[in-house]
Image (spheres, rainbow, N blue to C red):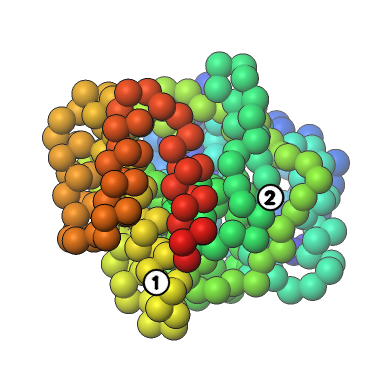
Amino acid sequence: MKLTIIVPVWNRKDRVVRTLDSIAASRNHDFELVVVDNGSTDDSLAVCQQWAWAHRDDGFPIQVLSELRQGAAAARNRGLQACQTEYVYFFDSDDILSDDFIGDVLKVMELGAFDMIYAPVCMEVNDQRKVRDYVRGGGFSEHVLTSMMGTHSMVFNTRWLRGIGGWNEEMRVWDDWELGARALLAKPSIYWMEGKEYHRILVHDNSLTGSGFSHSWEAQVKAMQCVYDELSHASELKYRERRRGLRSLYLRAKIGEGQLRKERCTEGAAAYHQMAADIYAHPVKPLRLLGVMLCDYTAVGGRGAWRLALRLVRWNS
């Protein structure tokens, strides 16, 4: 057995069974399932324990653990601590796993040893499905702007993930964005799966993915600051890579400022504005003008500002 699937759970008694059922419905059962209840105040822990007992003969090992330290990152790290397989995958407790995913990932593992395996996934908002944006073969700068290294897209070599520190428990939101950035700065060997997209990642008001910026802007800025610090201390980066990364972070901050302006969150917009200034106190005029344009465009409801930002960062690298 080479793969462990870890599912953190917090107050999901009405949703988690559907998620666990989708995992049990996988065509390939050559994996271990670890469910980590994160101090739920509803009956989630009991529901998970009952489900595990009912599925004890399904052909794959099941553990149900508890982690009282709050936060999805803490729950995931608890599962990572218990993981005994070569690879580990994290899945949220309110989404639907594709029945062919595990089999396809195991086939990739037979091709060689990788630090990460990337899988394209589908987001679902109001019954509308779309492939989550990503850049095949992309690195730190691409991820900063696209958030392509989402939780569901990253399969990790367990030892390698532990070596870079696992999940950052100080992150309350964007913890996968921060982990993806940190992982890419470590220059992993990545296998990029292609040809199909996986899962139903359900975006709703109470999802881990979230549905807006204004409700958690302080935690977002904290994540931005963390990634900025990680980039600043990445000693093995070449000058051009670092400059490209800084430009991407600067433009991401300006787009965030515009999003908070659109949501009429004045304090959050000001914090993003200051974050951009901290990244580039005196940006060159073209970069400054682009940042202003992307901010204003986003503030009036424009979509896809990251696409233009990504093109210009890559072109001017």
Q: Secondary structure at mark 1?
A: helix
* Residue toward you, 208 or 223: 223
Residue 218 in percent (x, y) is at 22, 42
For marks 1 and 2, give the one nearer the viewer.
Answer: 1
| Furthest residue in direction bottom, as rendered | 236
Q: Can residue 249 be seen in this snapshot?
A: yes
- Horizontal side of 31 relative to 40 (left or right) equals right
Q: Can residue 29 be seen in this snapshot?
A: no
* Residue toward you, 257 or 66: 257
Residue under label 2: 119
Give the residue drawn at x 21%, y 23%.
264
Amino acid carrying mark 1 in the image: Arg
Name above or below for residue 55 compared with residue 174.
above
* Residue toward you, 33 or 250: 250
- Horizontal side of 178 relative to 186 (left or right) equals left
Residue 98 in percent (x, y) is at 74, 37
| Furthest residue in direction top, as rendered | 126
- Quadrant of the image containing the N terminus: bottom right
Residue under label 1: 242
Amino acid carrying mark 2 in the image: Ala
- Residue 240 sits in quarter: bottom left
- Residue 38 sits in quarter: top left
Give the residue drawn at x 59%, y 41%.
133
Q: Earlier in the sequence, mark 1 or mark 2?
A: 2
Give the residue drawn at x 42%, y 65%.
244
